[in-house]
Amino acid sequence: MKILGIDPGYAIIGYGVIDTTKQNLVIDYGVITTPKEDSISIRLKNIESALASLFETYKPDAVAIEELFYFKNQKTVIPVAEARGVILLTAQKYCGNIFEYTPMQIKQALTGQGRAEKAQIQFMVKNILGLKEIPKPDDAADALAVALTHAQTSPRLNTNKI
């Protein structure tokens, strides 16, 4: 199963594509960025366009998205929520098989504890995927963590080998 993991944002959106049927699980990872000088409407359009390209290129069977859980910066919560809406709409349009995970669920799935630190999650992503180094930037590593969470917790997958 091909899974597209997404770490939502509006300045930086992390993505990671894995395939649970392949020996080398990682297909691709990276980030979508939007220039801060662009208006929010232009940024949302660019997010949709970049995501559409990812869907057309990789044709994922499922999309795993990190849920917004807590925001320290009140200035960015609304734009991130708007970007997340565009992400969900685009995922529905191209795939329809959408799963959402809280940060605590992701930490639990990858480390066995819901209060794991970011460095622990990144270390587990690197090890589970057999990568030489932790994926950079952090948003890409986070997106791979979301994809792995779906691979390890989805009842539709027998992924004990991951």
Image (cartoon, rainbow, N blue to C red):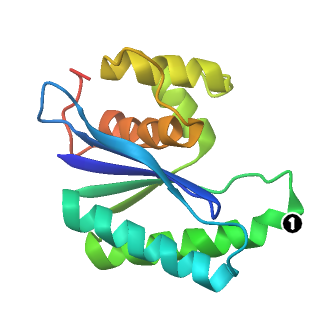
x, y percentage for residue 76? Answer: 79, 64
Quadrant assignment, res 139: top right
Of the pair 85 and 137, the residue shown nearer to us: 137
Q: Secondary structure at mark 1?
A: helix
Mark 1 residue type: Lys
Q: Residue at x 18, y 33 (%)?
A: 158
Is residue 61 visible from the viewing direction of this image?
Answer: yes
Q: Is residue 136 above or below residue 40?
A: above
Quadrant assignment, res 78: bottom right
Q: Residue at x 28, y 56 (%)?
A: 62
Give the crowd class for mark 1: few <14, some 14-19, many >=20 residues within 10 Å. Answer: few
In this picture, residue 148 sits left or right of residue 102: left
User: Would you name the residue on which mark 1 appears?
Assistant: 75
Of the pair 156 and 96, the residue shown nearer to us: 96
x, y percentage for residue 148? Answer: 37, 35
Is residue 59 visible from the viewing direction of this image?
Answer: no
Q: Residue at x 65, y 60 (%)?
A: 11
In this picture, residue 135 sits left or right of residue 38: left
> Which quarter shows the C terminus?
top left
Q: Is residue 149 above or below residue 94?
A: above
